[in-house]
Image (cartoon, rainbow, N blue to C red):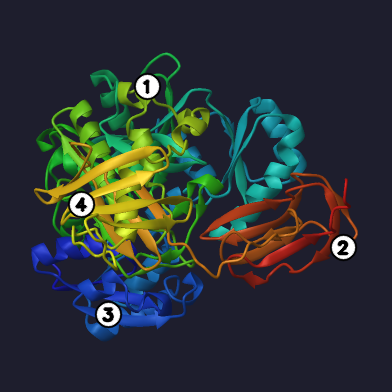
């Protein structure tokens, strides 16, 4: 076993690897960018080395700096985590050339699976079923359009490099192909430095089922499947293991196909073989096709660990240090069911835009596994993926594990940034999902239901005003006094006001309009109108949060705030910090509502900004290549004429 390894990554995956290394007695070296100098993974590691600026290209993608850090600290091996350089064969070769061990597959195996078109050809030769489509080298736009026509719409345009839904576009009709191709190529070039794409038939009721494999370079085993069908814009949201509705026949067929795929390339280490499954007639052994192989550890690996009892990072370290596979196929057992939900800093109401902010409050439930790379007080940076944590539950049955997930999400508390927490909780309670009736289109079909913003009930509003009055701990903190009457004061938050009356210490009456709430602090918690509220009041600067059965945030009233009018929709503002990738309009140009104005690249994704109304462009305030902050004005339309 290694004595010391360097982790060439950041965030929750670096912290996850450190946890296993500590248990095994392996010392760890972290690397960090300027933006991550105070990050959690830096604090947890035994040593840490600064490697560059905040942009990934200046730090986490600098293989030379990472290798230099490993050699300078005496690390024997490099663990790549996932993302960044984890699937870069040139980096693997450079690590070996420096006399270090790469904890993962060989450069040859990564190259074999690194381009989706070549990987599909290799899999066909190995007897693994592949999705119908065009995987050839001809990248002429007209040729690709003809290939799509031959396959038959709808089709998927997919980047041949990378993953994570980047460089992927669904095209449902011929007239949209050219625009979607240009968009996919642009995003692929930005994310992977390779604009090449392939064309695949789009399966009408698809399920995304992947198989965890592990090899030692000669033979391989599988650790059963994960269902990753709950996706938004091709990004996984909630994953589970095993797949609901899986039959023994189907599991055997998929497991054998995945092992054939791994052994065909002499795979060593942890990897995932991803399949698209046509679920229109249930799960059938003749209805699954190879999509791609991820030659690294996956974000969702904890659900596999939960149902097998195997620490995949430990296996990675043991095999990379020269040990054989720790177990044979017949020794790997499947026990219970597990779920993982990805908690992100993102604005669901604004179309799931990535968000930034300082985490003023962060608390995870004791009964669930929470993997995180942040702490209260940390800042969600615009430079990296905005993941806050992964919440994982495991139970003896699917129903129990899913109920545990819903409860864990309700008990998770995040302050300081908007999150997708309420969306995840709604998804965990979705009737179709609970039945196991899942496919990759579920979220899109029921998006309105899943993102509905339920107004806070009386108990939540009353507790928010109690917090604003400084009474969260039950003390009688209202200023002034009255004779022969309870202390009383009107309290206001943004969009909420009411009368607070202190009847006794820990006993408050709150009147909001025509509603009244009798609130008592007893047994360590607030009761409202004779029932336990099951909620906590958390105060942070300028905000009162009520956590319990969800999260509700109320901002303090700013007495100096003035209303501002952004020109009746005339200004297009950047919704988050990012790089202006393209501008499609010029001064004097007429636009209609919904027309594309610009493309913003932020947090590894492209975001198209459109006109809020029809009008004439007065000014274009940015140029392609400009780095902008959140709220920066990008395009201004001429003012609307009165009466128009």
Taking the image as drawn, is residue 550 in sight? no
Q: Secondary structure at mark 2?
A: loop
Q: Quadrant of residue 586?
A: bottom right
Say which of 506 and 195 sits in front: 506
Sequence order check: which comes first, mark 1 or mark 3? 3
Q: Mark 1 and mark 3: span between their CA atoms? A: 46 Å
Q: In percent of the image, x 24 and y 83: which residue is there?
A: 73
How crowded pointer 2 is (Cα within 10 Å; few <14, some 14-19, many 20+) is rated as some
Q: Which mark is residue 503?
A: 4
Instruction: Name the spot of residue 575 as percent of width and height, x first.
Output: 59, 59
How crowded pointer 3 is (Cα within 10 Å; few <14, some 14-19, many 20+) is rated as many
Q: Is residue 613 above or below residue 202?
A: below
Q: Which mark is residue 270?
A: none
Instruction: Name the spot of residue 141 as percent of width and height, x first.
Output: 74, 44
Q: Quadrant of the N terminus?
A: bottom left
Q: Which mark is residue 587?
A: 2
Sequence order check: which comes first, mark 4 or mark 2? 4
Q: Which residue is mark 3?
A: 48
Q: Pointer 4 and pointer 2: residues touching (CB < 8 Å)? A: no
Q: Which mark is residue 437?
A: 1
Q: Mark 4 and mark 2: span between their CA atoms? A: 64 Å
Q: In percent of the image, x 37 and y 38: which residue is there?
A: 515
Mark in front: 4 vs 2 = 4
Left or right, residue 169 beside residue 584? left
Left or right, residue 133 beside residue 71? right
Sequence order check: which comes first, mark 2 or mark 1? 1
Q: Mark 1 and mark 4: span between their CA atoms? A: 52 Å
Mark in front: 4 vs 3 = 4
Say which of 638 and 252 sits in front: 638
Q: Pointer 2 and pointer 1: residues touching (CB < 8 Å)? A: no
Sequence order check: which comes first, mark 1 or mark 4? 1
């Amino acid at each position: 076993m290694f004595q010391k390894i360097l982790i060439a990554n950041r965030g929750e995956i670096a912290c996850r690897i450190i946890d296993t290394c500590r248990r095994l007695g392996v010392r760890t070296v972290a690397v960090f960018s300027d933006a991550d100098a105070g990050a959690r993974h830096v604090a947890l590691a035994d040593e840490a080395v600064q490697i560059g600026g905040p942009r990934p290209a200046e730090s986490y993608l600098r293989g030379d700096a990472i290798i230099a850090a490993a050699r300078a600290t005496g690390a024997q091996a490099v663990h790549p985590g996932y993302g960044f350089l984890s699937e870069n064969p040139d980096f693997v070769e450079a690590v070996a050339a420096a006399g270090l061990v790469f904890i993962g597959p060989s450069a040859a195996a990564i190259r074999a699976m690194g381009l989706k078109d070549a990987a599909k050809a290799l899999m066909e030769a190995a007897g693994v079923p592949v999705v119908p489509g065009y995987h050839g080298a001809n990248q002429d736009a007209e040729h690709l359009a003809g290939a799509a026509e031959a396959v038959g719409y709808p089709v998927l345009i997919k980047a041949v490099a990378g993953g994570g839904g980047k460089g992927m576009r669904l095209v449902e009709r011929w007239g949209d192909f050219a625009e979607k191709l240009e968009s996919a190529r642009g995003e692929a070039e930005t994310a992977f430095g390779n604009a090449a794409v392939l064309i695949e038939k789009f399966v009408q009721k698809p399920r995304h089922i992947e198989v965890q494999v592990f090899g030692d370079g000669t033979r391989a085993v599988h650790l059963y499947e994960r269902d990753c069908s709950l996706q938004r814009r091709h990004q996984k949201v909630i994953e589970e293991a095993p797949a609901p509705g899986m039959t023994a026949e189907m599991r055997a067929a998929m497991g054998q196909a995945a092992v054939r795929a791994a052994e065909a390339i002499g795979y060593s280490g942890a990897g995932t073989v991803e399949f698209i499954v046509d679920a229109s007639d249930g799960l059938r052994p003749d209805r699954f096709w190879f999509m791609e192989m991820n030659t690294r550890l996956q974000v969702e690996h904890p659900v596999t660990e939960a149902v097998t009892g195997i620490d995949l990072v430990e296996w990675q370290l043991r095999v990379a240090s020269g040990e054989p596979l720790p177990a044979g196929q017949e020794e790997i057992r499947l026990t219970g069911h597990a779920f993982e939900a990805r908690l992100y800093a993102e604005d669901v109401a604004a179309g799931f835009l990535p968000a930034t902010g300082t985490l003023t409050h962060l608390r995870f439930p004791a009964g669930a596994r929470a993997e995180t790379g942040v702490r209260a007080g940390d800042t969600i940076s615009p430079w990296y993926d905005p993941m806050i944590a992964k919440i994982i539950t495991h139970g003896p049955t699917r129903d129990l594990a899913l109920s545990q997930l819903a409860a864990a999400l309700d008990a998770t508390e995040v302050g300081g940034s908007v999150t997708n927490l309420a969306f995840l909780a709604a998804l965990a309670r979705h009737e179709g999902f609970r039945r196991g009736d899942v496919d990759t289109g579920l979220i899109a079909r029921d998006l309105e239901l899943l993102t509905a913003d339920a107004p806070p009930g009386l108990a939540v509003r009353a507790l928010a005003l109690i917090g604003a009055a400084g009474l969260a701990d039950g003390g009688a903190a209202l200023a002034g006094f009255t004779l022969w009457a309870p202390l009383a004061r009107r309290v206001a938050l943004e969009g909420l006001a009411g009368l607070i009356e202190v009847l006794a210490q820990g006993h408050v009456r709150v009147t909001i309009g025509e509603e009244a709430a009798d609130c008592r602090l007893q047994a360590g918690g607030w009761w409202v109108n004779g029932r336990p509220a099951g909620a906590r009041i958390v105060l942070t600067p300028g905000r009162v949060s009520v956590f319990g059965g969800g999260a509700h945030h109320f901002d303090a009233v700013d007495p100096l705030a003035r209303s501002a009018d952004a020109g009746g929709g005339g200004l297009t503002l950047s919704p988050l910090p990012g790089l202006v990738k393209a501008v499609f309009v010029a001064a004097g140009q007429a636009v209609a509502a919904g027309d594309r104005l610009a493309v913003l690249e932020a947090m590894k994704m492209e975001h198209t900004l459109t006109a809020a109304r029809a009008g004439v462009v007065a000014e274009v305030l940015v140029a392609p290549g400009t780095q902008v902050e959140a709220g920066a004005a990008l395009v201004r339309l001429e003012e609307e004429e009165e009466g128009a």
